[in-house]
Amino acid sequence: MASTDILFKPFRYKSLNLPNRICMAPMTRSQSPDQIPNDKVAAYYKARAAGGTALILTEGTAPEHKGATNDVNVPHFWGKESLDGWAKVVKEVKSVGGHIMPQLWHQGILRHEGTGPHPEARSSSPSGLSRKDKQITEPMSDSDIADVIDGFAKSATYAKELGFDGVELHGAHGYLIDQYFWEETNQRDDAFGGSLEARSNFAAEIARGVRKATGPDFPILLRFSQWKQQDFTARLAHTPQQLETFLKPMIDAGVDIFHCSTRRFWEPEFEGSDMNLAGWTKKLSGLPTMSVGSVSLNMDFVTGFRQAGAEVSGIDKLIEMMERGDFDLIAVGRALIANPDWAHKVRDGKLNELTAYDPKMLAELV
């Protein structure tokens, strides 16, 4: 196995000071009854930080907007009891020298009306479309858009007040921000629709609102993907030039780090280069990037997260890509569910001691 030293170089950006490049990918666990992260949630994240993971990205949490989630067991990032729960999580992670950011996740039209902790709330959508040809609800009005932006900004403010190290905005996988990115679900003809650049404006305005609420040094991450859970072959940008156009409004709005979600980190994004999405995003934006996708496992997470297990695989390709500077950070998902001390085992050359991932591990927080 190649030297893993590159994974254990410190990473510094603004107020973020990490001892290594290993992050925990956000993974929905739905184990926060009444939307309150409890002691089990705190212990779950603490164990990964104690095991050497430099930065914990929490499971998706609902920003302060009643239509954000369809799941009564997904934690809120607003309301006194939920925030008190998150305060305990931060305390536990920090007690072992860890760093942590909440991921703010609005489901948009994928949250069916009548579901979740606030069934009375209307679901949000740029055009009311689940796909281009299927009308589900009314398009978001200007005041609806302002309310969602304000909800993200308020929750980011709570994160800063609680001592989190930044926030991540979930703009991937077909959820609300991504519904604005995607032409099939965004048929608006105002400033938030039309061209690829204009379809990035909703995310940019959320980032701008978060930046205004939290100040210049509070790190803002934005996770995006080309694929959607509704369509694995979907693409926002078909060329590097289109990707640059897509990214510009978010860069201008103050996004600090792009978390580029792919199902398999080693797969090239565009013809003629073996760089992945994170590599291209770093090259075009000049900003740090985080890659993700089946790290140290032999099956992608869409196939393997709930339905099938995944065996341990090597990380030589990951090391090669990081050594040549393709991206700055790597997010590890299912392998960290199976191995809270994944980082320590990798550091100590004990990949052969890693436990394979089994979806039965989702039954409880360990």
Image: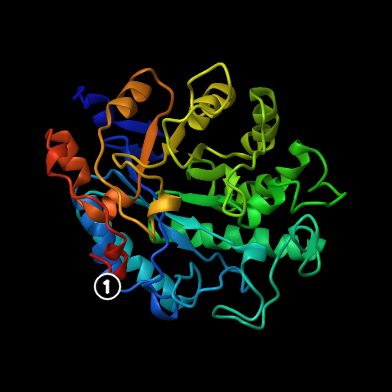
Quick one: 269 or 125, which is closer to the camera? 269
Residue at the spot x=37%, y=37% of the render? Answer: 330
Q: Is residue 130 left or right of residue 3?
A: right
Q: In the rendering, at what x and y percent does residue 137 appear?
A: 77, 70
Decide if residue 333 is in sight here: yes
How crowded pointer 1 is (Cα within 10 Å; few <14, some 14-19, many 20+) is rated as some
Indicate the secondary structure of the residue bearing disc 1: helix
Residue at the spot x=41%, y=45% of the render? Answer: 300
Tell me the residue that label 1 is attached to: 39
Count how many numbered circles sit on residues in the image. Answer: 1
Furthest-right residue in view? 189
The residue type indicated by label 1 comes to: Asp
Q: Is residue 158 left or right of residue 49?
A: right
Residue 5 vs 26, above or below: the answer is: above
Q: Is residue 32 left or right of residue 273?
A: left
Furthest-front residue in view? 308
Residue at the spot x=72%, y=62% of the render? Answer: 125
Residue at the spot x=50%, y=27% of the render? Answer: 268
The quadrant the C terminus occupies is bottom left
Quick one: 86 or 22, which is closer to the camera? 22
Q: In the rendering, at what x and y percent does residue 163 appear?
A: 38, 56
Residue 125 vs 250, above or below: the answer is: below
